[in-house]
């Protein structure tokens, strides 16, 4: 049982491996973990469902709804107004969402279009609007380059940097040329 808004427990953004990332492989797909398959086959269900506690209620929800609750909560944590506290969440979420903001989500390299559609469903369920999706390799390069260029740390002729992510699903190599004024993506494989 996941306590989605368990601020009094281990914070969700620090315990994210047990929350949103646990749903990553199945969001937008009909996959389920090996231990869930026998249970769901017995119950005659095609999709994975999770038992979560939200708004002091025990609920059984699918991966997209679980992800939408986690996204809503993280959105609340990062964009909350000072007059909204944990006790009044989620009742005041509409106040937090009243000012639309651009959402950018980094997705893993192994995500398919189906997984991205699942995240779009989760965003829609959470009323968070449209999002831009970046591959994690590009997001890492952008983060690195933006911070360095802002402080003018690159030499005049620029610097070419190779980012290598040796993940459990695939290895990704991204080569980026950085300059203090601009950057351009040289290669991604």
Image: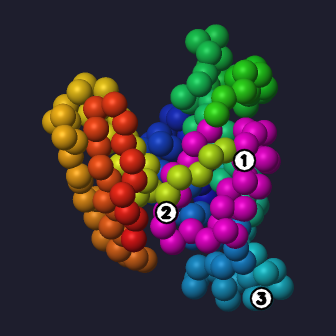
Rendering coords of residue 50 (x, y %): 68, 64
Q: What residue is shown with label 2?
A: 108
- Which quadrant of the rendered structure holds the C terminus? bottom left
Q: What residue is shown with label 1?
A: 123
Colouring scheme, one of rainbow, by chain, secondary structure, one colour? rainbow
Disc 2 versus disc 1: nearer the observer? 2
| Res. 143 in view | yes
First along the sequence among labels 1 and 3:
3
Magenta span covers which residues?
A: 103-130
Residue 138's tag is none
Cβ–Cβ below 8 Å for labels 1 and 3? Answer: no
Tell me which residue sits at (67%, 44%) in the image.
131
First along the sequence among labels 2 and 1:
2
Residues 55 and 17: in front is: 17
Rendering coords of residue 159 (x, y %): 21, 46
Tell me which residue sits at (79%, 81%) in the image.
46
Instruction: Report the residue that reaches farthest toward the front.
Output: 157
Q: Residues within 10 Å of mark 3 (few under 14, many from 20)?
A: few
- In three-dimensional space, the C-alpha distance between marks 2 and 1, rounded to whole angstroms, equals 17 Å
SS of the residue at dot 1? helix
- In three-dimensional space, the C-alpha distance between marks 2 and 3, rounded to whole angstroms, equals 32 Å
Cβ–Cβ below 8 Å for labels 2 and 3? Answer: no
SS of the residue at dot 2? loop
- In three-dimensional space, the C-alpha distance between marks 1 and 3, rounded to whole angstroms, equals 31 Å
């Amino acid at each position: 049982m996941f306590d989605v808004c368990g601020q009094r427990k281990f914070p969700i953004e620090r315990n994210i491996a047990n929350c949103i990332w646990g749903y990553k492989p199945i969001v937008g797909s009909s996959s389920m973990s090996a231990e869930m398959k026998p249970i769901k086959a017995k119950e005659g269900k095609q999709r994975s469902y999770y038992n979560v506690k939200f708004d002091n209620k025990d609920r059984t929800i699918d991966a997209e709804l679980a992800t939408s609750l986690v996204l809503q909560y993280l959105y609340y944590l990062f964009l909350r107004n000072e007059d909204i506290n944990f006790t009044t969440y989620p009742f005041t979420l509409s106040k937090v969402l009243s000012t639309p903001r651009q959402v950018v989500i980094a997705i893993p390299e192994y995500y398919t279009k189906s997984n991205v559609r699942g995240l779009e469903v989760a965003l829609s369920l959470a009323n968070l609007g449209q999002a831009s999706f970046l591959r994690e390799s590009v997001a890492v390069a952008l983060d690195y380059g933006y911070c360095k260029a802002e402080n003018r740390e690159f030499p005049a002729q620029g610097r070419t940097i190779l980012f290598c992510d040796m993940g459990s699903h695939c290895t990704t190599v991204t080569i980026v040329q950085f300059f203090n004024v601009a950057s351009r993506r040289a290669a991604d494989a």
